[in-house]
Amino acid sequence: MSKEILEISVMVDEQFDMSFNLVEGIFGLILKVFGK
């Protein structure tokens, strides 16, 4: 694997982690609202 491909895959991983955390946060918020 070349260095460029490795850097791109790391960037994609970080973006995926961020969007996943965002979805998780929204889900948690919805669960809190419906949990009341």
Image (cartoon, rainbow, N blue to C red):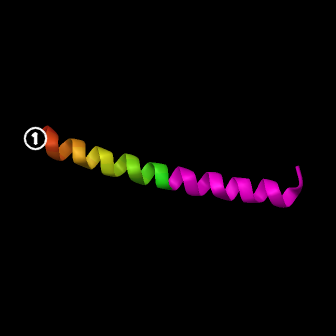
Task: Confirm whether the magenta stretch covers residue 7.
Answer: yes
In-image side of 11 versus 1 (left or right): left
Residue 19, percent from left and from top:
48, 55
Task: Confirm whether the magenta stretch covers residue 17.
Answer: yes
In-image side of 15 versus 1 (left or right): left
Of helix, strand and loop, which one carries label 1?
A: loop
The C terminus - image quarter: top left
In-image side of 13 versus 26 (left or right): right
Find residue 5 and report its image quarter. bottom right
Q: Please report the residue visible at 23 percent of the width from the left and 41 percent of the height from the top.
A: 31
Q: State the residue lying farthest toward the left.
A: 36
Q: Please report the residue visible at 32 percent of the width from the left and 51 percent of the height from the top.
A: 26
Task: Give the mark count.
Answer: 1
Q: Which residue is mark 1?
A: 36
How dense is the environment of label 1, judged by Cα within 10 Å: few (below 14), some, or many (20 and up)?
few
Q: State the residue lying farthest toward the top.
A: 35
Residue 20, percent from left and from top:
47, 49
Q: State the residue lying farthest toward the right.
A: 2
Q: Chief secondary structure of the magenta span? A: helix
Find residue 4 and report its image quarter. bottom right
Q: Please report the residue visible at 51 percent of the width from the left and 55 percent of the height from the top.
A: 18
Residue 12, percent from left and from top:
64, 56
In-image side of 16 versus 30 (left or right): right
Tell me where the magenta segment starts and ends, as one range: 1-18
Identify which amino acid the numbered label 1 is placed on.
Answer: Lys
Q: Please report the residue visible at 89 percent of the width from the left and 55 percent of the height from the top.
A: 2
